[in-house]
């Protein structure tokens, strides 16, 4: 293997704080962009459309070419839309949840334009990463696009989103602990090579939030930490050139649950539970993870969902086949056995899973 030169893109606009939606136009203008199109997710225009559109129209150097209510991640619907947009656009803006961000990200990528990500909930690291999840041949498929050129997060909006989105974001961020551990495990078995800087960034991103004192998870500075951590995790993947720093065996269990369940839970909820389970299997920082997910109320929330231990059991068995080219803890039979035993013996897992 030769030395690959990997060009890294990092966001030019990075605005996380209070009242950011009212200033979207000025952030974009300052970054040198002149003509934009905006895609809104379902129901998003009614909530935030007016504020964002007027902030763009207020800027003399900015032109709003068009706006759309379009968040269809099915590839055959997305492609005609991507190529029927105004050809003069300098950037594509997506506003809303995961679906519209993935749609806008991929439309921008197909047109070779910068993408500006404005999440209204931060339930996973999708708003800050180069990957997107599209439906191809009827199946959810991870597709590579490009890093967002801009990330604008209004914490007043995030704070008022349903709590499940915050829990999901916390579940996705805590997973960096088990993911990075799996990555080192893989390197020890000569299956991959850890990128040390990406691993450091992924570790720092989770450590800063799990060590943070707070009294409520809706506190502004705590939410800012969560958003910054998820962003760092997205950038760690960009540096590594793959998802390994942010996604290990815990993500394989969640991907398997997506296949098994008729109605899967939010990504970060499934990932958070699986992270706790895998930290017990890895015997690595499980006490810290237990404390974080306990203190934040994550476990109590999960208990209300009545998820079944037997579905997790099936997902554990299915996990290695999701990414057969990887070599995580779960790619070993003995660890799958251990994980399944823990579902029945660990007090917390017994409490939160039916
Ligand atoms: Zn994730």
Image: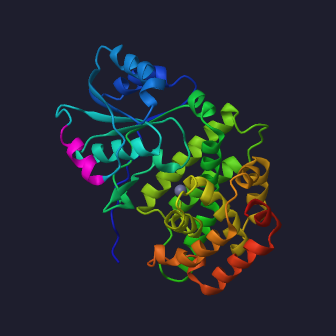
> On the rendered image, what quadrant is the C terminus found in?
bottom right
Magenta stretch mostly in which secondary structure?
A: helix
Q: Is residue 57 magenta?
A: no
Picture coordinates of residue 5, whole percent (x, y):
33, 62
Q: Nearer the viewer, residue 266 or 120?
A: 266
Judge by depth and name the residue closer to the eye, 346 or 150: 346
User: What residue is drawn where x is 70% and y is 57%?
Assistant: 306
Viewer-closest of 57 and 100: 100
Magenta-drawn stretch contains 83: yes
Q: Quadrant of residue 150?
A: top left
Q: Which residues are magenta?
A: 75-84
Compared across the picture, whether 294 is left or right of 151 comes to right
Q: Residue at x 58, y 47 (%)?
A: 229
Q: Nearer the viewer, residue 17 or 156?
A: 156
Return the residue found at the far front. 262
Picture residue at 26% right of the left edge, 48% below the top: 77
Residue 274 x %, y %: 64, 64
In this rendering, position of residue 12 left or right of residue 334: left
Horizontal and vertical percent position of residue 89: 22, 32
Q: In the figure, is residue 143 to the left or right of 303?
A: left
Decide: is 158 above or below 107: above
Residue 118 in sight in this render: yes
Give the residue furthest to the right.
Answer: 347
Establish if 249 lies above or below 147: below
Q: Tell me if I can see residue 192 in this picture.
A: no
* 95 lies above or below 346: above
State the image quarter where residue 55 is shown: top left
Name which quarter of the figure residue 299 lies in: bottom right
């Amino acid at each position: 293997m030769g030395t690959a030169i990997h060009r890294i893109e990092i966001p030019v606009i990075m605005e996380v704080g209070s009242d950011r939606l009212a200033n979207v136009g000025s952030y974009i203008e300052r970054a040198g962009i002149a003509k934009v199109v905006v895609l809104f997710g379902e129901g998003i225009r009614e909530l935030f459309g007016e504020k964002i559109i007027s902030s763009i129209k207020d800027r003399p150097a900015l032109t709003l070419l068009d706006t759309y209510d379009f968040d269809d991640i099915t590839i055959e619907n997305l492609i005609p839309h991507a190529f029927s947009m105004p050809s003069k656009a300098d950037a594509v803006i997506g506003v809303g949840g995961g679906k519209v961000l993935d749609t806008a990200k991929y439309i921008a990528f197909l047109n070779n334009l910068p993408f500006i990500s404005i999440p209204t909930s931060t339930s996973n690291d999708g708003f800050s990463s180069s990957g997107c999840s599209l439906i191809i041949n009827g199946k959810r498929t991870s597709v590579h696009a490009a890093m967002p050129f801009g990330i604008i997060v209004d914490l007043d909006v995030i704070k008022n989103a349903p709590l499940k989105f915050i829990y999901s974001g916390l579940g996705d961020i805590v997973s960096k602990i088990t993911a990075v551990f799996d990555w080192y495990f893989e390197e020890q078995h000569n299956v991959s090579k850890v990128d040390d800087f990406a691993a450091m960034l992924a570790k720092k991103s989770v450590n800063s939030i799990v060590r943070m004192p707070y009294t409520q998870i809706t506190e502004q500075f705590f939410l800012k930490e969560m958003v910054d951590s998820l962003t760092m995790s997205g950038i760690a993947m960009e540096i590594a050139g793959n998802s390994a720093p942010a996604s290990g065996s815990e993500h394989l269990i969640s991907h398997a649950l997506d296949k098994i369940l008729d109605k899967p839970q939010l990504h970060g909820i499934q990932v958070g539970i699986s992270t706790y389970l895998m930290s017990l299997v890895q015997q690595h920082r499980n006490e810290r993870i237990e404390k974080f997910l306990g203190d934040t109320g994550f476990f109590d929330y999960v208990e209300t969902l009545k998820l079944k231990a037997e579905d997790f059991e099936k997902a554990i068995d299915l996990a290695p086949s999701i990414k057969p080219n990887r070599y995580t803890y779960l790619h070993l039979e003995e660890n799958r056995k251990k994980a399944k035993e823990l579902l029945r013996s660990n007090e917390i897992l017994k409490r939160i899973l039916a």
